[in-house]
Every structure is written in structure tokens, then in C-alpha cells.
Amino acid sequence: MPILRKLFVLFLFGISVTLAHAQIKTVSYDIFKNEINGNNPLPSEEVFFVRGPLPKEILMVTMKVGRSGNRMRYSEEFAWRKAFDFNVPQFEIFVSQPIRSNTEYNLVFSFFKKAEKSQIEAVKASIGNSLDSYIRSNFQVSGSGIKSFNSDLVMISQMNQIVKDALEDYRHILGREFEGFSDVVRLKLEQKDRLNLKKARFNITGRNREDNAKAVYAAQYVDELILAVKNEANQYLDNGLLTLVESRHLANFPTEKKPGTLPLNFGYASIPIKRTLENREYLHGPYAGISIPLGNSKFTKVLGNASFSTGVFLKNFEASTGEKIEGTFIRLPFYAGVGYKMFRVFRINAGATTLQIEDLNGDVGPVLLQPFVGLSLEFKLWIGFSDKR
């Protein structure tokens, strides 16, 4: 029971430390000056909010983030959407993916309002014409049937891209993404493989419907396919769109420079041992050491939380039958192993420790390598003397 009581106290202390660090930072965006955070570096390696005044009629604000020098590609987009018809004076975007320390980013703020009916109809017509031209240019009729210049999967992928490209300056009013054409379109594309035409090869776009009944049958199939893809695209658009009103760009904006840290562990562990003892013993004691993470936990969860750990137990041990069990490193047990961080401040450690057993006659045995497992609190020791950016 004593070891359980100690682990429980350790757990409660760790939870209190976690809650003390739970506050999320907020930075301000000045839409008039196109300034963010007062031109100070953005928070790095942590989530944060971006807050700013909401212009009239604006229903959605997005923030794109991309590392500078990455050909202006934006790896993340964060959005705020106005709820219902409330009078809201500000927008507040939650940046849920941390950005890297001491790095320059390109930012784009985009402001959307509800699209007019005429704008939606224009988008429908543009998408419909593009899909119509794409499908007709991809099919050819031969004696054996209708053939396409691309596979069904490629055609669906390219038609999906046609719709997405046309909607680059629009967002769905309900926040939905266009998920691509359904299985209905896929099955319609597969239907062409079962058509049997026996006339010489000619292009559908150059057909004469009156001269060739089978060409008319092929044209009917193409018209049905075009109607199917237009209906699915229109079904997405009919729910309403938001249209882009204005975009604001910030180039090469810096982030905070985080100082280097060295994780320190203080915990309690158990070591099973038998060897020359009469019975198996379980040794319990405190330990302290350092952990070297295998990655940055803000960006790679598994490797970032895993570590190589090493340190010493803070006391030697004694078996129930009187034998002394001591370490070989500064006369304290040395350990090395792996660790995994949980709940921000706890680390489970497992590995091996070096021990020597001194029997009741004072004879010291050979160096033994024994497994151990422990739970520790982790504190970060700040290292380095450079100022934050």
C-alpha cells in the first residue's frame, strides 16, 4: 500500500501542474492596418486564438498558414463561421495545429459573405459547361463500343478537380466540402463497357444523329452521363454558397523562438530481483534522470512522446533477509531505458538498472542487469541564453 499511496500523490501533483498550464493564448488581428499580434512574433508550438473585428455582412473568416519559401503553398486552413443571425462584433479563429518555433510563415486572411443567387447560377453554368466539354472530349465511338481516353477512376478524379477549382473563391454555407461524385456516376461510367456498337470509329462531337441510329444511342448515353454529373454538382451548390469578398496577405511573418529544454524526471519505480536471494524481491525507490525525446511532440505525437531515458536511483536497497543491494555508479543504481510521456507531465519509464548484491558475509557479487518500471513527473530545464524573437 505505501507504494500505491506515493504513486497517487505523484499523480495528483502532476494533474495540478497540467491544469495550471491549460490557458490558451489569444492574439489580435487588426484588419485596418493588416497587422497581427501588434507585429510581434506569433506563438509557436502551442495552439492559440486569433481575434479581430468582424466587417458588416461577413459570415466566415479563414486563415491560411504556410511556411515561407514553400512556393506559397498553405499547409493548413483554419476557419471561423458566424452562428445563426446573432449580432457578433468579432471573429475568433482557433489555430488548432501549432506552428514551428523560430520560423517564418505566410498568412492569408479571407473574408466571405453570402453569395447572390445570380452568382450561384453563374457558378453552376461554369461548372456544367466545363464538365460537358471534358466528358465529350474524352469519349470516342468505335465498332466495339464507346471508349474513353482515360480510365474511369482518372475521369472521376479529374471531374472532381474541375468542381473544386471552380469553387476556389467560394465556401459552402454549411461548411461542407465537396466530397466528389458518387457511385451513381461511377456505375454510369462502367455502363459504357457494356454497349455494343458496330459502326466505324468516329468522334461523338462530329456525329450526325440523323444518319446513324447507333451514334444517336451513344450520344444518348453521353448526355445521360453529363446530366448525372451536373445534377450531383448542382445538388451541392443548391444549399447555398459564401463568396470571397477580400483577402489580406502577410508574408514572412516570424514566430516565437522557443529556448531549448532538457526534460528532467523525478519518479518512483519497482525492480524485481531473485538471483542469489532466497525469494524473489521487489525493490521500490525514487529515481531521477533525464529524457531525450525522439521527436517534437507538438508535430509527431508518437515519436515526440517517446524518449531515451537515463539516470540513477536515489537510494540503495536491502533485501528482506538482510543482503545489501547497491549500484555500481557512484554507489547508486544506474538505469537506462525508454520512456513515454502522458498527460503532458507524466512519463512511464521501463528499462534496466545495474546492481550488485553484498551477502551477509560482506562478499560482493558480480554486476547484475535487472529490469525496472516506473512512473515519473517531468519538468523542463530551460537551456540556452538567446532571446526570444
Image (tube, rainbow, N blue to C red):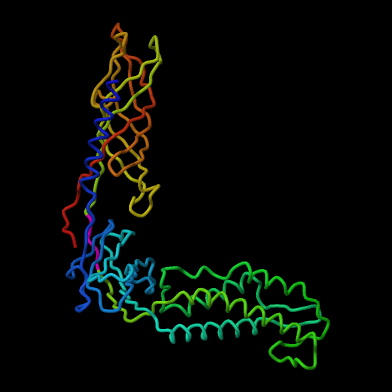
Residue reaching furthest to the top:
361
Figure quadrant of the N terminus: top left
Q: How many marks?
A: 0
- Whether 118 is drawn above or below 366: the answer is below
Q: Position of residue 114 (x, y in %)?
A: 37, 79
Which quarter of the figure has residue 27? bottom left
Say whether residue 16 is left or right of residue 199: left
Say whether residue 335 is left or right of residue 240: left
Which quarter of the figure has residue 248? bottom left
Using the image as rendered, state which of residue 52 and residue 323 is in the foreground.
52
Which residues lie in the magenta part? 254-258
Using the image as rendered, state which of residue 150 and residue 207 is in the foreground.
207
Q: Is residue 282 magenta?
A: no
Secondary structure mostly seen in the magenta stretch: loop
- Whether 203 is drawn above or below 372: the answer is below
Using the image as rendered, state which of residue 328 and residue 207 is in the foreground.
207
Q: Position of residue 309 (x, y in %)?
A: 32, 37
Say whether residue 143 is left or right of residue 73: right
Using the image as rendered, state which of residue 140 and residue 351 is in the foreground.
140
Say whether residue 299 is left or right of residue 255: right
Residue reaching furthest to the right:
198
Q: Position of residue 69 (x, y in %)?
A: 34, 72
The residue positioned 17% from the left and 70% from the top of the image is 38
Figure quadrant of the C terminus: bottom left
Q: Position of residue 29 (x, y in %)?
A: 22, 71
